Amino acid sequence: MKASVLRAPAKVETNPLEFADVAVPEPDEGEVRVRVHACGVCRTDLHVIEGELPPRKSPVIPGHQVVGAVEKLGRNARRFAIGARVGIAWLHKTDGTCEYCRAGAENLCDAPEFTGYSVNGGYAEYIVAPENFVYAIPKGFPDEQAAPLLCAGIIGFRSLRLSAIKPGGRLGFYGFGAAAHVAIQVARHWKVEVYASTRNTRHQKLALELGAAWAGGTFDEPPKKLDAAIVFAPAGEIVPGALKALKKGGVLVLGGIHMSSIPSFPYDLLYQERMIRSVANNTRQDGEDFLRVAGEVPIQTHVQIFPLHDANRALKALKNDAIPGAAVLRVSE
């Protein structure tokens, strides 16, 4: 099969992904093999490819926003029929036995596996995954439109939950890429007022088109104090400004898997019971709940499509904020 393979971490400007022939994977017990139709390109892929996340598998096929059709069943795999349209996300597998899994916090599992990082992902014509960690894709979402839901959507949804925002509340978004452009649609569905801070004027325009009450630069102070805010951009220098924008008791959620160093800041920015929370991965329940809400809204994703062999170009565009919405690789029909 054809795949875009990372042999060793490197800056995307050097075109580190090799478009190559690799063996078609075989599903093990309880696994399914999926013929990949589309795979979203995520900022986490950038962190993997450029080595900001320490390598877990080498070589590795990146990609963890996978939509396709079940093509083969492993032994005792019965959850999906051949031909079923499914999605595969970042959380590939958990041990199911650690204290976190037993407590319903599998996103904090002590021995997790991650799609496109510790196991091969969806920048390929085929992928295997445990059937219990695979999602049914709701009807009404074309493959390329569905792909960003599987990470940008799920992580944005978990970030919204951890923000504890309520209907009528004011919520800030810092950075307005793939996750934010989905999360704003859920927030507006929940009757939340959204304020978008992002450096790219095209992204500001998209935020306003999607219902933001205000959009400005990354470090511009919103016109009203916020009940909560989510930092989607992997830039630690945003944190003090975002704290300053919060009301007393406000919650700041950090939505990325990687972030540059957070500078020191005066305690009075945190005082009066403001809170900082990080988001670590997602649970399967997050995914199931989000996909249900996505169908209710319904979410409309804004995507720019690239062929699989052009994955390096898609990553460079993502890194340079050149994509309003989400980048998606079209792998097969």
Image: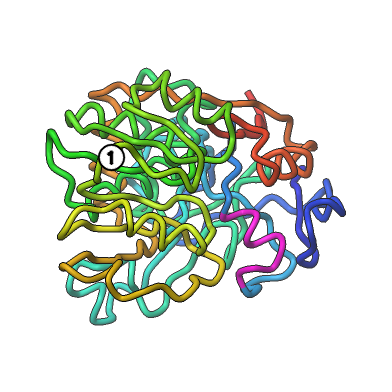
Q: Main secondary structure of the magenta part?
A: helix
Residue at 45% from the left image edge and 76% from the top image edge:
264
Residue 142: x percent and y percent?
A: 47, 21
Q: Position of residue 294 (x, y in %)?
A: 30, 30
Residue on which the image places disc 1: 290
* Whether residue 1 is visible: no
Amino acid at the residue labelled 1: Phe
Give the side of residue 65 with respect to residue 25, left or right.
left
Q: How many marks?
A: 1
- Note whether 185 is above or below 176 in the view shown: above
What x and y, as percent, mark residue 223? 31, 36
In which quadrant is the N terminus drawn?
A: top right
**243 sits to left or right of 61:** left
Q: Within the image, what quadrant is residue 186 found in?
A: top left
Label 1 environment density (alpha carbons within 10 Å; few <14, some 14–19, many ≥20): many
* Residue drawn at 45 percent across, 55 percent down: 31
Q: How does the figure colour the protein chain or chains? A: rainbow
Residue at x 58% of width, y 50% of height: 43
